[in-house]
């Protein structure tokens, strides 16, 4: 039964990853279409929308990756003072 729950968990991860990658692109292209039809920006606005959508998709992918894959790894504590070695002087 544990194998099935892991399989469903990873299936949900794949679905979430797909939505994280495609939805920002679709929303930015829909905004580009709106700007083109209502304000007459021209066809170049689709390239801007595609570029912004891909950037937003990559950012959501990176947040998903760091929360799911990297959650078991320790990150260095930024508040911890650094120790000085013999060769480091002020």
Image (spheres, helix red, strand yellow):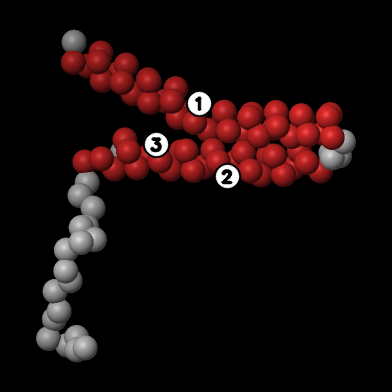
Say whether disc 2 or disc 3 marks the residue closer to the N-terminus: 2
Residue pointed to by mark 2: 55
Residue 88: give x, y in percent of width and height. Answer: 19, 86
Residue 89: give x, y in percent of width and height. Answer: 19, 89
Label 2: how many Cα within 10 Å (few below 14, some 14–19, many 20+): some
Find the distance from the CA under tag 2 to the CA under tag 3: 14 Å
* 30 horizontally vs 41: left or right: left
Q: Nearer the viewer, residue 41 or 73?
A: 41
Q: Secondary structure beneath disc 2?
A: helix
* 3 horizontally vs 20: left or right: left
Q: Quadrant of the C terminus?
A: bottom left
Q: Secondary structure beneath disc 3?
A: helix
For residue 13, above or below residue 43 = above
Quarter where residue 87 is shown: bottom left
Residue pointed to by mark 1: 19
Quarter where residue 77 is shown: bottom left
Pointers 3 and 1 in contact (CB under 8 A)? Answer: no
For residue 30, above or below residue 87 = above
Q: Secondary structure beneath disc 1?
A: helix
Quarter where residue 57 is shown: top right
Say whether disc 1 or disc 2 marks the residue closer to the N-terminus: 1
Residue 65: give x, y in percent of width and height. Answer: 38, 39
Residue 68: give x, y in percent of width and height. Answer: 31, 35
Residue pointed to by mark 3: 64
* 74 horizontally vs 23: left or right: left
Find the distance from the CA under tag 1 to the CA under tag 2: 14 Å
* 51 horizontally vs 84: left or right: right
Q: How many marks?
A: 3
For residue 90, above or below residue 15 = below
Q: Residue at x 37, y 20 (%)?
A: 11
């Amino acid at each position: 039964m544990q194998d099935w729950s892991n399989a469903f968990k990873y299936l949900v991860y794949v679905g979430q990853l797909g939505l994280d990658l495609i939805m920002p692109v679709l929303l930015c292209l829909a905004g580009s279409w709106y700007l083109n039809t209502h304000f007459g920006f021209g066809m170049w606005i689709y390239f801007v929308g595609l570029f912004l959508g891909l950037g937003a998709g990559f950012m959501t992918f990176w947040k998903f990756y760091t929360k799911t894959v990297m959650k078991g790894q320790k990150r260095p504590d930024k508040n911890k003072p650094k120790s000085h070695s013999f060769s480091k002087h002020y």
